[in-house]
Image (tube, rainbow, N blue to C red):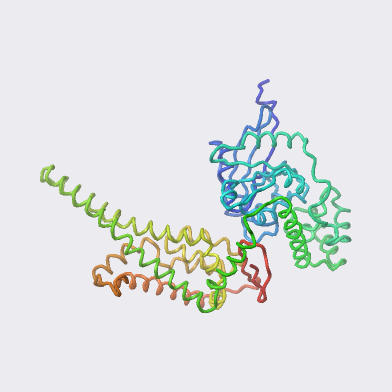
Amino acid sequence: MHKSSLAKQINIALVGNPNSGKSSLFNYLTGLNQQVGNFPGVTVDKKMGQSNIAAGLSATIIDLPGSYSLYPKRSDEWVAYRVLLNQDAMIKPDLVLLVADASNLKRNLLFCSQIIDLNIPVVVALTMMDLAKRKGTQVDIPGLERELGVPIVPINPRKNKGLEQLKKVIELSAENLYQPPSRDFIDNNALAETAIARVKEHYPEISNYTSIHYLINQEHFLLDDGMHETIEQIEIDNTFNPTKTQAEEIVQRYGRIKHIMQQTVVEADPLQKAMFNERLDDILLHRRWGYIILLAVLFLLFQSVFWVAKYPMDGIEWVFGEFGGLLSNALPVTWWSDLLINGVLAGLSGIVIFIPQIMILFGLITILEDTGYMARISFLTDKLMRKVGLNGKSVMPMISGFACAVPAIMSARNIENKKERLLTIMITPLMSCSARLPVYTILIALVIPSELYFGFLSLQGLVMMGLYLLGTVLALLVSWVMKWFIKSTERSFLSLNCQPTVHPGGRML
């Protein structure tokens, strides 16, 4: 018998918050042994791969969509949720490998604590340690392990650090050498004691926290005949309130997370940082100045497209002109030389010359996102967006539509409300994408004189900004009209990636 036939095979669910380094770890563990498809019934990518964890142990790694909590809103979050709750008929994880961002540990620990309370074997891979160090954050990993009750391994997949240790810990967890936490992260039983006890009469093997999810989402679970009605009756008999239970749970979890952070994480003067952020928000989110600053940012954005890009564009034009002149002198006068110089080379020049403008536009949008201003734009414009049937999160796909409509439409999946998501998808193609930028540039160069006002304001840049604003206004007008034809009773709220605070009007920050 071959040695490979004796190897133990396990399924590992790879989970974590979006942008936590999950994809890099998946690529390292699986190498080229990857398959990409769709989960049954939904158009959500399913990435699976084989990994040799140790001698005699191989694993199927299932890369689940990024999630912020075990309360799904989007279709991709529902995919991860069903797998983690053992409600996916195709995938049954034996172990959960949770990737957590050390530079945003408080946000990541919410999802981590929820998975721990499912009583599934969990291994935490702590990424972004170098970024946390640059921010002045120090994590006491042994202390954090004691508080959470699960093994934690700091890793850096791109620099190949900690990965062999991670494999060793996975091997030990697969052999049941790590004991699960002796108690829940919070007292889940106290959230709905009688209802939980009634559910566990039918499913004694599940945890208290899993029982709560049976009560909340049983209609989405794979249950035996009649169990849906039984659990629904348990809810009625115990006046179980899903919204209230969820709110109490989140508050308790963040309370415990705050205590753990105080015990195990040292941050660089967090009070000063919080005060700075508050002062910054007072300015950027001001009800009048905030909009003026937003217009100023967009104005500088489009001025830069012409002003900064002018120099590399002139350089590219000179290079192609010189190269075309050299070819004209070196090649004979024939049809194929004319095709090469005036067709291929001239056509290539007409495309490449606009690359600096596109790169600058993409780069500045990326800077706005990385500095957190995009999230502030979402909050600032939420009130305006709701008047036309959208919400603040619609701004990000719309601004991304200035670059390319395809990824912008894909990014609209972060909008939880189905109606608002559909409206955002419908109007995003109306935004002036970068494919129109060369056309705008040529028309403006032909029609609008190259004049400067006050020595630095480009008239062409102002016209360019006007064209983009016109597209935005028309997109909002179309959304306002379409909102009357698309009906939905689903409640709308704005949820941004920070510690949740509920504000009047249903907005969650």
Q: Nearer the viewer, residue 184 or 48?
A: 184
Considering depth in this image, is 320 or 261 the residue closer to the camera?
A: 261
129 is higher (above) or lower (below) than 171: below
- Give the quarter of the image for residue 27: top right
Give the percent coordinates (x, y) of residue 203: 84, 51
Residue 408: where, in percent of width, then height?
48, 61
In the rendered structure, the answer to whether residue 224 lies left or right of residue 345 reads: right
Residue at the extreme top: 1
* Image quadrant in which you'd find residue 191: bottom right
Percent x, y of residue 482 = 52, 75
Q: Quadrant of the N terminus?
A: top right
In the foreground, 103 or 124: 103
Q: Is residue 384 left or right of residue 178?
A: left
Task: Place residue 448 in its image quadrant.
Answer: bottom left
Say which residue appears at 48% left-offset and 69% top-offset. Answer: 427
Relative to 421, residue 168 above or below:
above
Tell me the quarter of the image containing the C terminus.
Answer: bottom right
Disc tally is 0
Q: x%, y% of residue 12?
A: 67, 41
